[in-house]
Image (cartoon, grey):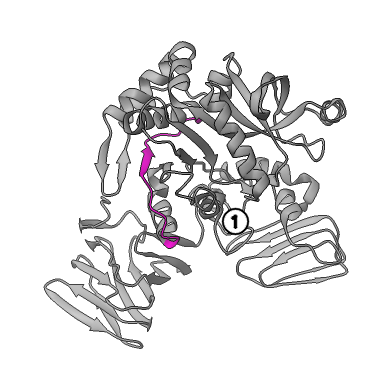
Amino acid sequence: MSDKIIPIIMAGGKGTRLWPLSRSTAPKQFMELTGERTLFQRTLGRVADRDLYEAPIVLTNAEFRFLVAEQARQLDCPLARILLEPVARSTAPALAVAAVVVARDFGDQAVMQVLASDHEIVADATYFGCVARAREAAKAGRLVTFGITPTEPATGYGYIETGAPLDGGAFAVKRFIEKPQREKAEQMIAAGGHLWNSGMFMLPVGPFLKELRELAPEVLDAATRAVAGARHDLDFERLDPDAFAAAPDISIDYAIFEKTPIAAVVPAAIEWSDLGSWDAVWKLGSRDEAGNVAEGRTTLLDTCNSLVLSKDIHVAVQGLSDIAVIASEDAVYVGRLEDSQNVGKLVKHLASMEKTAPLTETHRTAYRPWGGYTSVLNGERFQVKRLFVKPGKRLSLQKHHHRSEHWIVVRGTAEVTIGERTIPLRENESVYIPQGELHRLANPGKILLELIEVQTGSYLGEDDIIRIEDEFGRQ
């Protein structure tokens, strides 16, 4: 039993609405969009008060597990558990799993707060006042959602119509409303009593499990079996794949909140955005006197009310207004800010074609638990990469059937294992790894190790890696 709030952070989404920066293997929650910290790290910061919160439980998928662990480590933020979902499911199965785990670890009287890892929130006194009101309503047996006080007739959010007032500043939920047309949104704003559905919740575990048992028994059964069959993998817990896959793919709104008589909403007049489009990023950004938000290597001339971001190349924009220009390492998006809600349609089109599908999946820079690599140049039977290895980390002991490799150290110190030999390499030194030879790369130093890797061979795919020994549990 704990008197503290149990934070549940949902970090498994693969949304691509902020393409080309956000991709299926590098979604927005792990990106630095509005400051030096990623959205996931900023979410961790909102639950860092150990007088109020227990250590967070994070739900994510296996592909993001090392990103979650590393970004928490950077903040020196201990995580109670990292639960890995074996297949993609909507929010109801995930929250059912969280409730089963919290009931087991803390008891039915515990209260858990559900937070999305990809929202931007100003965590000020107003925000924590809403948290306190939601907590009291949850302790009184209500399933509580946070309703954001609307600032405009937005059509990208669902709405909640408030019902009768409850003790402590919460309200009963009268009904949920799907994302409306603009005319309907304007009518609701004018009428009052309508809030944006934030997707954040405060849930008393016992009553929540009871409602799951009565309203969504298949969801609860699958979640219970998935937790019972979970296995530990390093610092992670892998939910039973067959059990979790059997859960209906349904949101918590449809499964529970639209049916339960004990739903409540706390109006939250807070600064909040789900950062679901580039115009949302522009609205939150620091605008200059012309209304522009620009980051990275950019030049703007006679341009106003625009968002220009570059992660690599220099972008120059002249004589335009109300546009978004987003440049990643390998793709550039240009569109009207008012149309940026529809980037998902463009991404689906790109994903449907063989030549452009990779642009929706991966970046040229890929991150790994030991560091990562950037693809520099690709050609017939060769490719060039920049490898970076964090201090004290090492890659798996591995071999390749179809390629050989040349490594040149440009920064730091490397320790290279080739067969039975271990070779130290310093800056400007190099080594050759023959095809089929067992090898390993390590950074024994205290600064980042950077190398240039030249691969040559008949096949250069990432799946030509035979791992013999790997401290990160990869196959």
Q: Residue furthest top?
A: 214
Percent across and percent down for residue 211 are 48, 16
Q: Is residue 176 visible?
A: yes
> In this rendering, is residue 241 above or below 453?
above
Q: Is residue 225 rendered to the left or right of residue 434?
A: right
Residue at image position (73%, 40%) is 269
Percent across and percent down for residue 49 are 49, 50
> In the rendered image, which quarter contains the N terminus?
top left
Q: Is residue 168 rendered to the left or right of residue 316?
A: left
> In this rendering, is residue 11 above or below 446?
above
Percent across and percent down for residue 243 are 33, 25
Secondary element under disc 1, as helix, strand or loop, is loop
Q: Is residue 168 magenta?
A: no
Q: Quadrant of residue 213?
A: top left
Residue at image position (39%, 75%) is 448
As rendered, which of 122 and 230 lies closer to the eye? 122
As rendered, which of 467 and 436 lies closer to the eye? 467
Q: Is disc 1 surrounded by few (<14), some (14 to 19) or many (20+) residues within 10 Å?
A: many
Q: Quadrant of residue 87?
A: top left
As rendered, which of 135 and 22 lies closer to the eye? 135
Percent across and percent down for residue 17 are 63, 45
* Magenta span dominant secondary structure: loop
Q: Residue furthest left?
A: 420
Residue at image position (74%, 55%) is 282
Q: Is residue 427 rendered to the left or right of residue 466?
A: right
Query: What residue is pinned by disc 1?
Result: 21
Q: Quadrant of residue 83?
A: top left
Amino acid type, callout 1: Leu
Q: Is residue 275 visible?
A: no
How many marks overall? Answer: 1
> Magenta residues?
74-91
Q: Residue furthest bottom?
A: 428
